[in-house]
Amino acid sequence: MFHLLDAQTFDSRDVRCKQPYGAVPAGTRVNLALRPLRTGGFSEGLLIAYFESRNEERLEVPMEWKGMDGDRDVFQVVLDTGDYVGLVWYSFRLMGLDGRQEELGPYQLTVYDGAERVPGWFGEGMTYQIFPDRFRRSRIPDPTGMVGGRTVHQDWEEMPEYRPDAKGEVRNRDFFGGDFRGVMEKLPYLQDLGVETIYFCPVFEAPENHRYGTGDYEKIDPMLGTEEDFRALCAAAHRLGMKVMLDGVFNHQGFVSRYFNGDGFYPEPGACQSQDSPYYKWYNFSHWPDKYDSWWGIYSLPAVNESEPSYRDYIFGGENSIVRRWLRAGADAWRLDVADELPDDFVHGIHQAARETDPNAVVIGEVWEDGSTKIAYGVRRKHILGGHCDGLMNYPFRNSLLGYLMGGKAEDFRAAMETIRENYPPFAWRTAMNFLGTHDTPRILTLLGCGTDGQDHDKDWRAAYRMTESQYLLGRTKLMLGALVLFAFPGSPTVYYGDEAGMEGFEDPFNRRTYPWGSEDQTLLDWYTALGKARKELPALRRGDLFWGQTQGRLLTFLRQGEGEPVLAAVNAGLKSAAVEVPWPARDWMTGKELAPGRRLLPPLSGWLLVPRQS
């Protein structure tokens, strides 16, 4: 049916239609306005608000006609959020003199608890993700007596084991021996790179090289070193202005763990040996001892019953709980593995314990989607409504930027990021962990160079594959553009170890090879170092607001300003030159090239990070 509602009738990002912008703290009175064309002949407006987390309460509020604005009628209403925290889904109904009705919506309004101060440090600086076994070793360790029946690669450059064993299992028991002393040796390297937070994948004792099946939360894995080594590393990092983030894996543990003790390695009886074990209630057995809930059905990762009081006390409740203990030992933050598989009140307990131990501690959650709308196990999650996660891993950023770099349109990247900015509380937008790759994704260089994840070939092919020279150069060029966007965008630019050195590889374990010390791609390393320096030294990149510039086709520009001097990021991912509007006499931070204001041609597959030129 033909009707006269257009995009300007209501736009939730237009201050004439909605104030304030985006998510709001509880207690905010939100001003909403409809602006239909007068020729539409509408005489009445109605707001319909659905308070999802308040027993699904539904409100209908008549809108008041406020007069005309040009050729448009204006209907207004105030939505009072009161003490509500959660999502409000709101829509509108316009009614004509002839009885005709038109509906708009629904639209999302995120209402968060704004009572708490969220530390801002994480979103300001660069984060570096280390997979501890593969970054740097100070010696070749002896695995004798360690949990898990480990083997150690003598040669640092060897391929990680990826083939199944005689039982058809990929065991992940081959180690390279990366350790804390190795990281200590390379702290000056990380400082030169501009790193301000080191994010470690799990460091606690565990049988597998990835350590996501925890063996003992109270013990540093002996291959990494001792608790004293960990404390010394944190102290040394702090002296260099760096913080340390630990990976908290609290949804599941190892079959071979002190708590489950599936192979009897630990002397104390675990849940698998005895129903009298203090850990028995931590697990859900359908048939003891051989049938139990596990993470994604993987028997080697028994799932934990997070509602069990003794487990909650052990992880966060008690004075010497795991969350508190390791913050006191020197850590500054926790990243929560599979945060959406932890109950909201469990996450809240971790958050509360962290803040009580250190008011500047930060909790970051692993969520792969828009964290404001995430539903897990039938429940809308409270991840970023306050008092839970301070920020999330920003997979929507990665996915959208990857899409743009691999041929998509800049306007699609902008639209995806505006959705996140509108849906997220300001603290979560600024404290996001932004990245191009992690230990759970193929190496970004390989994706950009090959244009594929290689899944149409077998695993042996993916293990042996190395990019051709032309693929490598294309991947590197696109990665440099992606890194420029990453470091210029709000949120913490996070680099997966070795991406700055030119590491390639498909999925796990090929994305977890050892760091190529002495064989780094110097072009890439210099680029990342310049970006790290920019992020550290330019206040606009640390705390400035985001303003979109040109976002058409293969050209993406945006401005960061509001703190210090403004910075303009410009990327041309296309194969033809593109005209960029340079607002002031500028210098490209990356090359030193000077540009006069006005329309300037940005060459194909290149980017600028422009700062005002000093006269």
Image (spheres, rainbow, N blue to C red):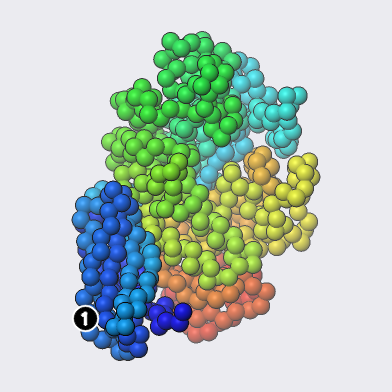
Q: Quick check: 160 above or below 53?
A: above
Q: Find disc 1 in the rendering and name its residue.
A: 66
Does any portion of residue 267 appear in the rendered image? yes
Q: Secondary structure at mark 1?
A: strand
Image point 46% across, 12% down: which residue? 275
Q: Quadrant of the C terminus?
A: bottom left
Q: In terms of image quadrants, where is residue 22?
A: bottom left
Image point 57% across, 38% down: which residue? 131
Q: Quick check: 504 above or below 173?
A: below
Compared across the picture, whether 361 is left or right of 163 comes to left
Does any portion of residue 25 appear in the rendered image? no
> Residue 608's spot in the image, x, y percent?
55, 70
Query: How many other residues sit within 10 Å of disc 1, few (<14), some (14-19) or many (≥20)?
Result: few
Q: In terms of image quadrants, where is residue 5?
A: bottom left
Q: Residue furthest front?
A: 99
Image point 58% across, 70% down: which residue? 409
> Residue 596's spot in the image, x, y percent?
50, 82
> Residue 308's spot in the image, x, y percent?
37, 25
Image point 39% across, 47% down: which residue? 380
User: 607 or 367: nearer the eye?
Assistant: 367
Q: In terms of image quadrants, where is residue 540?
A: bottom left
> Residue 118's spot in the image, x, y percent?
31, 49
At label 1, which amino acid type do we have?
Lys
